[in-house]
Amino acid sequence: MKNIGIVGYLLFLSLPLVAQQRAVTETGEQVVLYNDGTWVYVEKDTLNVEEIPFNPRPFNRSKSASFRLKSKRIGIGCWIDPKTWKFQTAQSHESAEFEIDHVDGSMYALMITENLDVSTESLGNLAIQNARSAAPDLKVIAREYRIVNGIKVLMMRMTGTIEDIHFAYFGYYFAEDGGSTQFLVYAAEDFMEENLAEAEDLLNGLVSLNK
C-alpha cells in the first residue's frame, strides 16, 4: 500500500507522471485507455455547475483531536487526533506543508498552503484541473459548501485512476485574504468508503487562526 501514498501525492501536486493514455473516438469524443484494455469517457462537466449547494449543518473539530498543527505560511491550522494520525513536514513538494498519515498506513492526507489570491471556488476548480493532468477520468462525486469551525469551505469528494489503482479523495478547500489551503485525504477507493468517518474527522480539524 505504500505506493498509494506516492501516487496520490503526485496526483494532487500535478507532477509529471506516466498514467493512462488518452485517445479520440471516430465521433471526436476523448476517452481514457487503461492498461487492461478498458476505457472510459474523459470527464468534462464537473468544473461548470450552476450553483454549489450549501450544507447548513455546522461541522466542528472532534473531541479526540487534541494536537494542533500550525502553518508557518498563512493563518491556518488543523487539530488532529495523535492516536489516529501521525504527521511530518512535507518533504516532496514546496506547496505542501504537512503530510499526515493514518497510523495503519492505508490512508493519507496533505495540507497544501500557498500565498494565492483566489476565491474558494476557483481554488476548487484549480484542484480539479491539476488532478486531471494525472487522472483524466477524475470524477467529482460530491461538492458543497460547509461551515467548519466557523469558516466557509468548499467540500469535494472525487475518484480517479492512476496506474490501474482506483483512488478516492475527500478534501476541504479554503481561501481568504493572504492565502489558500487545500486539505485533503486520499486512499484506495474501497478503503476510503470503509473509513469515511475517520477521514471527515480529520478534515473537521481545519481552523482559521485569523478568527
Image (cartoon, grey):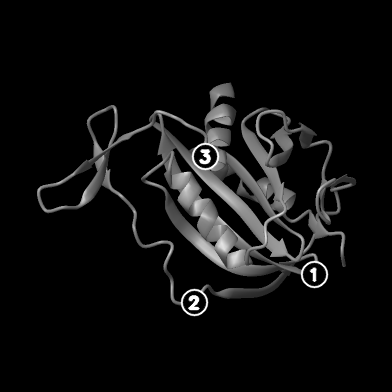
User: Which amino acid lies under the numbered mark 1 shown in the image of this protein?
Assistant: Gly
Say if 17 sits above or below 197 in the image. Answer: above
Residue at x-position 57% and y-position 67% = 144
Disc 1 and disc 2 in contact, CB within 8 angstroms: no
Q: Nearer the viewer, mark 3 or mark 1?
A: 3
Residue 33 position, x and y percent, is 26, 36
**Hey, which quadrant is residue 164 in on the image?**
top left
Residue at x-position 76% and y-position 66% = 177
Say if 127 sits above or below 120 in the image. Answer: above
Task: Tell me how far mark 3 sits from mark 1, CA to CA.
Answer: 30 Å
In this view of the protein, which residue sits in the foreground, 19 or 156?
Answer: 19
Q: Which residue is mark 3?
A: 14
**Hey, which quadrant is residue 135 in on the image?**
top left
User: Which amino acid lies under the numbered mark 2 shown in the image of this protein?
Assistant: Glu
Q: Earlier in the sequence, mark 1 or mark 2?
A: 2
**For the N terminus, which image quadrant?**
top right
User: Which amino acid lies under the numbered mark 3 shown in the image of this protein?
Assistant: Ser
Residue at x-position 59% and y-position 59% = 123
Q: Earlier in the sequence, mark 3 or mark 2?
A: 3
Residue 79 position, x and y percent, is 83, 49
As helix, strand or loop, the secondary structure at mark 2 comes to loop
Q: Nearer the viewer, mark 3 or mark 2?
A: 3
As helix, strand or loop, the secondary structure at mark 3 comes to loop
As helix, strand or loop, the secondary structure at mark 1 comes to loop
Task: Tell me how far mark 1 sits from mark 2, CA to CA.
Answer: 22 Å
In this view of the protein, which residue sits in the foreground, 162 or 101?
Answer: 162
Q: Which residue is mark 1?
A: 150
